[in-house]
Image (tube, rainbow, N blue to C red):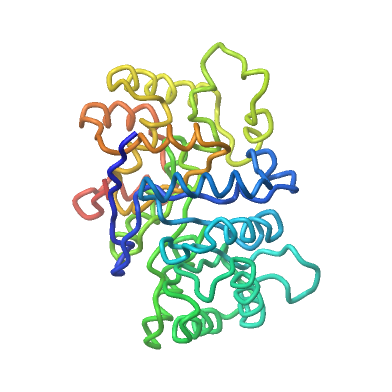
Amino acid sequence: MLIVMEYRLLGGSGLKVPVLSFGAGTFGGGVEFFDAWGATADEAQARRIVDICLEAGVDLFDTADVYSNGRSEEVLGKALAGRRDKALISTKATFQFEEGPNRVGSSRYHLRYSLENSLRRLGTDYIDIYHLHGFDAMTPIEEVQDTLHTFVREGKVRYIACSNFSGWHLMKSLAVADRYGWTRFVAHQVYYSLVGREYEWELMPLALDQKVGALVWSPLGWGRLTGKIRRGQPLPAVSRLHKTSQNGPQMPDEYLYNVVDALDSVAQETGKSIPQVALNWLLQRPTVASLILGARNEEQLTQNLDAIGWNLTPAQIVKLDTASAQPPIYPYWHQRQFAERNPPPI
């Protein structure tokens, strides 16, 4: 399969990232949450998956210190051994997986501890994109942003990003960085899918205004858009959906079935699979820089790679938009009544 990878600038930076990236949360294993997603501790299989990614131009690999309690970083580091210069590594800190009152959060103490350990586990002396995995309301934003800026000045981090922030979290962090001339966030790792469109309400307009690129996690809606969930059909007897469908945001069955019906219709029109259509829809949304794909095996990875190299038609996008639309919460429903002053981002 010949893949011609597309690259996009990440937010307001000069860094180009592939529109499809690989989520190494499936590397490591040994933790129930990640085992449910098909995690593997097999280093040979991980190296083979990295081989396929690099051959296809998927050179951005995303992980985090908490994934399988650091094991994901270790396996990824070994899989990239001898070719670190061919890859971009994204990892994260903030969450807790070790005991101790200072082993959590975004304090200077914890971020420094987390970064040094991530570098060791990954077998590298720098991180290309370093994320705050979540917002820490207990640590002054000035302390957080100063610490991240110091990492960049030291050369241990190339670019900084955040994940799972609310609009005001992100905007205040950017404002503090601007006030002191510190390094800005260039990306926001967010949940966004055809069955999870809340990102469009405030975070997308903010990202457009502030030039913050979206790195999308769980683009298939916690596995709900794989084509295995269908109206009137039980889940396959053997499927990780028995566990993962209970995680993440819940939604009415009828809403999900309507979205899958629309995906099924477009898939038949395009000759593509339901997951490929769902991924392609995301790649045509504003601010989206890259979709983070997980894969349990080579077959799943190569199938997802076929989500690029073609585009949905405007009519197909409207069909999917209509089926997946949900009424926004306040104040967004109110603002949408005045589109002449508050134009939607899409």
Give the position of the N terminus as an image quadrant: top left
| Along the viewing direction, whichever of 135 and 293 lies nearer the viewer | 293
Q: Total of numbered circles in the picture?
A: 0
Give the position of the C terminus as an image quadrant: top left
Residue drawn at x 30%, y 65% as measured from the top left: 211
Seen from this angle, which residue lies furthest right? 99
- Residue 268 lies, with reference to residue 161, above or below; the image says above
Residue drawn at x 56%, y 64% as measured from the top left: 92
Choose top left, top right, bottom left or bottom right for residue 79: bottom right
Residue drawn at x 47%, y 76% as measured from the top left: 157
- Residue 39 lies, with reference to residue 262, above or below; the image says below
Estimate the x, y position of residue 343 in percent, counting from the top left: 23, 51
Please indicate whether residue 319 sits to the left or right of residue 273 in the image.
Answer: left
| Along the viewing direction, whichever of 165 and 83 lies nearer the viewer | 83
| Along the viewing direction, whichever of 168 and 263 lies nearer the viewer | 263
Please indicate whether residue 134 sits to the left or right of residue 152 in the image.
Answer: right
Please indicate whether residue 222 sits to the left or right of residue 109 in the image.
Answer: left
Estimate the x, y position of residue 295 in percent, counting from the top left: 53, 40
Seen from this angle, which residue lies furthest bottom? 180
Estimate the x, y position of residue 281 in percent, counting from the top left: 33, 37
Choose top left, top right, bottom left or bottom right for residue 250: top right
Estimate the x, y position of residue 257 in percent, counting from the top left: 48, 21
Seen from this angle, which residue lies furthest front? 82
Residue drawn at x 80%, y 73% as measured from the top left: 100
